[in-house]
Amino acid sequence: MIHYRLAGPALALLIAISAPAALAQTEGTHADTVVATVNGEAITLGHMIVLRSRLPADYANAPAEVLFDGILEQLIQQQALASQAGDMSRTSELVMENERRALMANEALLTAGKDAVTEEMIQDLYNDTIANAAPVPEFNASHILVETEEEAQAIVATLEGGADFAETARAKSTGPSGPNGGNLGWFGLGAMVPEFEVAVTELEDGAISGPVKTQFGWHVLKRNDSRDQPKPGLEEVRGSLTNDLRGLAIEAAVEAAVEAAEIIRTDKTTLDPAALGDTTLLE
C-alpha cells in the first residue's frame, strides 16, 4: 500500500498496487510522452518521473515496475479532482507563487554551483588549505586527576622520586583514564580545555608538568609524544573541497543577484508584525 497526500490538508488517497506493471522499453520515450489524459489534460512520463523522485525513501526504493501503476493512478485521481475544484483559492495561488519562486531560485543556484567548480580550482584550494598549510601538531599525553592541589603536588614529588607514571595513575587518578594508566591517546589542538592544552603544548616530549587546575580538578600531565597531523591526499578531501567551492559560489550568486536587483522595501513601521500569523487575511 502506498499513501499519497494531495494539496488539501485533510485529503489523503490510498492506492493499492497489485501485480507489477510490465514496462516496455521503447525508443523515442521522453518526458513529454503522454501516459494518460483526464478531461483533456495530459499526464506525461515527466510528471511521473518528478513525482517518483519526491517519494519518501521507503517508496522510492521500490522497483519501478511496482511504482508505475501507483504513481499513474495517483496523478489520474489528482487531475480528476482538480477538474472539479473550480477556481483556485487565494491561499493555493500564493503557495504556487512561493513554490515557483523557490524552484526558479534553486535552478539559478544549481547553475551557479555547477559552473563554479573546476579541477584547477579544486587543486588550488587543496594546495592553499591543506598541502601548503602550516603543519598542525597533535599530542599523545597521560594525566593523573585528583581533587586538590596538595594531592597533585604530592604526586609530582612521588614521580620525581622515580615512581612509574602509569602505575601511579592507576592507583591515584579519579578520572576515567586512570585504569588505563592515565593515557589519553592522540589529540589535536582544541580537543582539551584551554588550561590543559596550554600545559601540554609547553611540555617537552617525555616531560611531566606541575599541578594544573581545570574545571575538572587538579592534573599532573605527562607528554608522551608529539607529531604533525598527517595531511590527507586530494582524493580523500575532493568531496568536501568541491562542496566548499560550490558553497562560496552560491553565496556570491545570492549577493550578486540581490545587489543587481531593484528592491523597494515597504517601511516596516507601517506594518504590524502580528499580521504574519493572521490567516484570515487570506480569506
Image (spheres, helix red, strand yellow):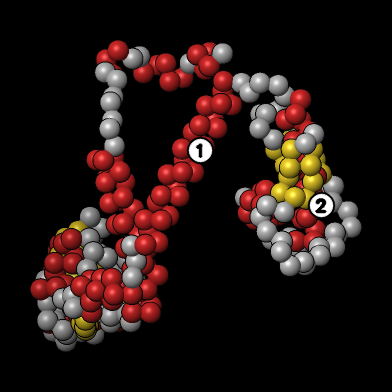
Structural crowding at the residue carrying mark 2, measured as other residues with C-alpha within 10 Å and reported as few (<14), some (14–19) or many (≥20)? some
Q: Which one is nearer the viewer's eye here, 122 or 103?
A: 103
Assign a secondary structure to mark 2: helix
- Quarter of image, res 160: bottom left
Q: How many marks?
A: 2
- The residue that mark 2 highlights is 69
Mark 1 lies on residue: 100
Within-10-Å neighbours for mark 1: few <14, some 14–19, many 20+: few
Which residue appears at 33% of the width and 82% of the height? Answer: 233
144 vs 48, left or right, is left
Is 193 drawn above or below residue 224 in the view shown?
A: above
Left or right: 263 in relation to 135: right
| Residue positioned 27% across, 32% down in the render | 262
Relative placement, left or right, of 249 versus 26 is left
Q: Nearer the viewer, residue 111 or 53?
A: 111
Q: Return the disc, 1 or 2, that comes first in the chain's sequence.
A: 2
**Type of amino acid at the residue the image marks with label 2:** Asp
| Residue that appears at 40% across and 16% down | 274
Marks 1/2: CA–CA distance: 28 Å
